[in-house]
Amino acid sequence: MTVPRPILFLDVDGPLNPWRADQERTERAGYRTLTMRPTGWELPAPPLLVRLDPRHGPLLLGLGFRLVWATTWKADANTWIAPVLGLPDLPDVEWPLPDLDDPEEVHWKTRRLVDVAAGRPFAWVDDQISAHDRDWVALHHAGRALLHRVDPALGLLPDDFGTLREWAADQGGGGQADDRWRGG
Ligand SMILES: [Mg+2]
């Protein structure tokens, strides 16, 4: 029997778009600086400045995960982000109205991601993960989980890809069977 691939919930701003990084440094490192107009950034608002490294798409596709957007970009990530990275259209998590004042200090994405994963193993890459999220997921998620924080001043680095690749391999995945997206 083939083991389905684990899910990788992927944030955009922070891991892929290192919004806190110095622009010159990111461009020297191979990032492209782009202006975008996703939903909510229509005229007269100024366009959004986004930095992306086109090498990240192939790296992400080779990690052994089922990739899923977990970002406020929602489906706009397929319009604006995926083509630059060379990613196919990916499913995206739909969010309830965020509770920014969570009594357990859990990130507003955390409960939803655990819901969507429904016991399946998942990794989550985001710049806003805290110890509260790790504790909460350990208590409420039946499967394995890797909550991997990326510094928004650095974006995804080779070490991050290495950690994710190893974790996916440890789940015994890599199969293609029965890993269609069944999330929300
Ligand atoms: Mg972020």
Image (spheres, rainbow, N blue to C red):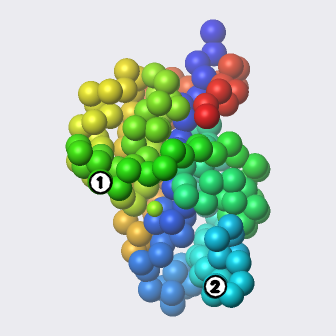
Vertical arrangement, residue 111 with respect to residue 98, above or below: above
Q: Quadrant of residue 35?
A: bottom right
Give coordinates of residue 122: x percent, y percent: 47, 34
Residue 101 has which mark? Answer: 1
Rounded to the nearest angstrom, the CA distance separating label 1 from label 2 is: 28 Å
Residue 44 has which mark? Answer: none
Total labels: the figure holds 2
Residue lying at 63% horizontally and 15% vertically, measured from the top left: 2
Q: Quadrant of the N terminus?
A: top right
Ranked by sequence position, the earlier of labels 1 and 2 is 2
Q: Considering the numbered disc 2 on the image, is that residue within a helix, a strand or a loop?
A: loop
Give coordinates of residue 110: x percent, y percent: 39, 42
Residue 45 has which mark? Answer: 2
Give coordinates of residue 19: x percent, y percent: 47, 75
Give coordinates of residue 168: x percent, y percent: 49, 35
The answer to whether one can see residue 100 in this image is: yes
Depth check, front residue: 62 or 153:
153
Residue lying at 55% horizontally and 35% vertically, measured from the top left: 7
Q: Quadrant of the C terminus?
A: top right
Depth check, front residue: 17 or 183:
183
> What is the three-letter code of the residue carrying label 2?
Ala
> What is the three-letter code of the residue carrying label 1?
Asp
